[in-house]
Image: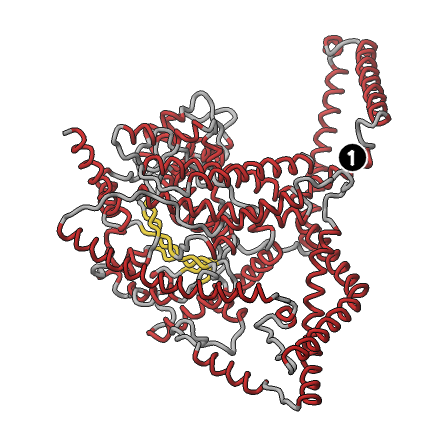
Amino acid sequence: MSQATYNKIWADAQEDLDTQLQTEREQFLQVEKDSVKAFRMLAASYIKYLQIFRSLEEAHDHLIHQQKRVAIQKVLNGVMGRMLELKKEMVELEKSEFHYIDNIIDDLKLLPEDAEIPIPRYFIKENLEALQQREKTLDEILLNAGLETQKPVKAMTFEEAVKTIQVAERARQGRRRALFKKQIYLQWKTKRHPKLQEKTGPNPDDAATCIQKVWRGYIQRKKTEQMREEEIIFLGMSLPPHSRALRSTSHVHARQEDALRGEVQERQEEEFIKDQLREIEGLNIRETLQDQIKQCFIECRHIIGRFPDYPSKEAGGSMAIFSQKTPEQVAAELAAKREAALQKKTQKGKQEEKGKKKAKEKEAQKTGIKKEDEGWKMAPSNFLPILEEGNSHYKAVWQNRDQGRDFLQDHDPELIKAEKREEVEEEIRVQVDELMQQKLEDLKLAVDGEKSSKKKNARKREKKKKAGKKKISELEKDVTPDRTIDSLYRELVEEGILIKAKPVKLADYVGEYSYLGTTLHKVDVEPMPSLADIRQLIALYGILPLGSQTVHEKAPLVKTLLLAGPTGVGKKMLVHAICTETGANLFNLSPSNIAGKYPGKDGLQMMLHMVLKVAKQLQPSVMWIGDTEKTFYKAVPKADEQMNPKRLEKFLPKLLKALNAKDRVLLVGTTSRPFDAKIKPFCRIYQKIILIPRPDYASRFVLWKHTIRQHGGEITKLLSISCLAKLSDGFTQGNIVQVVQAVLSKLRLLQMARKPLHTAEFLTPLASQDPVYSEEEETFKAWYDKTPLGQARSKAMEMSEKGGKGKKK
């Protein structure tokens, strides 16, 4: 598609965003007492933002115009953050991480595929060079340390290349010799038996005529096509062949090179324009600034009787001098300060009242007196200002812009000039401030005899800095100031703590959407979440915040994530998918992996300090704790005593305290036996707990198809995928993959052409696998009900049941 098409997609997305912002101003400002209606409003807004997100991501990925890409990316980050805020409100309303909104998708005339969260491709594209270099370095370290299982392919030596060519040439000569012998044999046979010659083939003249007909027809068709193409080029309906070839090659490499090439071009253009502005307008800007500051000094001394103090850098320097406030404005500022002081007093009173109200509520809870529900209201947003700003910027700059003459669609020099002019002014202002500050001191000394008060101010600042210092935790102290990040990175790789993530994408976690969620809800049946719901949660809590710095800083902060479920449901695969989609480093802090490494308390502190330092410096990063229930064992089994699995239990809270909103570091735990751990410290560490179930029928159907085709199999009428999906009820994704690998061996793939696959071939390997029994599934559900969100969900269900009974009476 052309650039005009993606410009249209962007324009449509901005229109939808403008409409959505207007509806939010009307709906979310009022208190809604009906929780069902409030959830429906939230879900509809969430789906609409998701559609805007998909359109903006597509336009951002394909557009070459760098300034447009920057404008889209700001709005894209705002939309992602707003989706996370809406998700938080939905979770608080329903007391569940999984929501069933297929009725809303049906009302909006959308497909289930439209509810999938896309992963922005700029997460990887913007840091492609750094990620490739890091991967190359990691491969070299693993290879030198002997930890690489598959060595990279080496180039052939000269002798090996000669030997390979000789073998290929001798084989070719053997085939030609065999063909020559066959021709001699056939000639001898025809001479010996002349009757065979009469029977073999038609008359040579007839064969020549047939060949001539075919050839003349082919030549005439080619000439006709060429004449038609020349006519189309002459009419301007198509490009000449050389231009078309150039265009086709550019389309082939567009997805890989356009973004990087555009960034380089823009940087060069920006630097050129900046230097040009500095040369042409720099002297005039300097002179005007100096004249204005001098005039300000003279006027101030004429009014006050002495020269003013020069504002510091923190106060804005000469920018503070140019405020030029009138007496009315000064009076208004004083009145505003008084109002602010009054507001502080009223806020203190309100806080005291809130404290009293909370105490009364606690007493009411103890005595059993219920309070009337005040209703739901949307919490304040950190991303609505970003969306409003992006929307107004689009309307002011891009909506009515004439783009007919911009054939290249790469950048706009006039917009770059406007941006760089401000930067040039700021640079010159800093230089002028230093010069004029010195001149002001000289004037004070010469005219008034005053000395500068720089030293006193410097001492005051030092005292303030010392007083403002905070206590630093043990892990935040820089124990390795003399070591570089590269040396720490190398040591962690050699110790096996920093590992290489498998190249797995989130889309490879195959699973179908749940189509009966709302229907089951209406019949008071709690449906099991589908694998598509799991993908959405991983994208929302793991990938989007790690990929975008803005989203991570301003969205509801999620430092920790727990993936719980039976063996084989794909927990480790999801961890690797988070790292692949965001380009994150993967630190393996599993008890089995750190056993015997960095012994003692000091050694453990050193290891965690190194991990934290490297993770923050080379963010985004993922710290993975496999079998994390062992860290919080109720009682350590004898088999695991040597491992000392509870080493990290006391240090994990300190590790999380050392992580701020700016640090794109996520702690992910995976467990197949969460009920073996102490529930309270377990749930304190992990904010978001995702229970991954076994796949349902729809997911198994899609999974069987995908896995068989992925391993080279062909699906025919003899292979019933529906039958396999029904028979594999209770089995996990890992079981299905193992069965397909066992059946589709190399020998079986060679026999595929003459012996198609049958359903019965998969039954014997499937019977040898261990399924997830209903007792194990119930144990997981019972454990999840003890988690904070599970308890809140069960309480809400009890309250709704009591309310329903009261209405019936």
Residue 321 lies, with reference to residue 750, above or below; the image says: below
Image coords of residue 418 (percent x, y): 71, 55
Element on which disc 1 rests: helix
- Is 297 rendered above or below residue 161? below
Q: Quadrant of the C terminus?
A: top left
What residue type is disc 1 on? Arg
Task: Tell me which corner region of the image, top left, top right, bottom left or bottom right, holds residue 466.
Answer: bottom left
Where residue 627 sits: x, y (%)? 32, 55
* Residue 186 x/y as whole percent: 73, 20
- Which residue is denoted by mark 1 in the rendering? 244
Quadrant position of residue 657: bottom left
Dividing the picture into quadrants, the one containing residue 588 is bottom left
Is 305 or 214 nearer to us in this picture? 305
Q: Residues within 10 Å of mark 1 (few under 14, many from 20)?
A: few
Left or right position of 600 against 169: left
Q: Residue 51, position in %: x, y?
A: 51, 37
Total numbered badges shown on the rendered structure: 1
Identify the residue shown where x is 74% and y is 73%. Answer: 290
One can see residue 633 in this view: yes
Q: Nearer the viewer, residue 651 or 95?
A: 95
Q: Quadrant of the N terminus?
A: top right
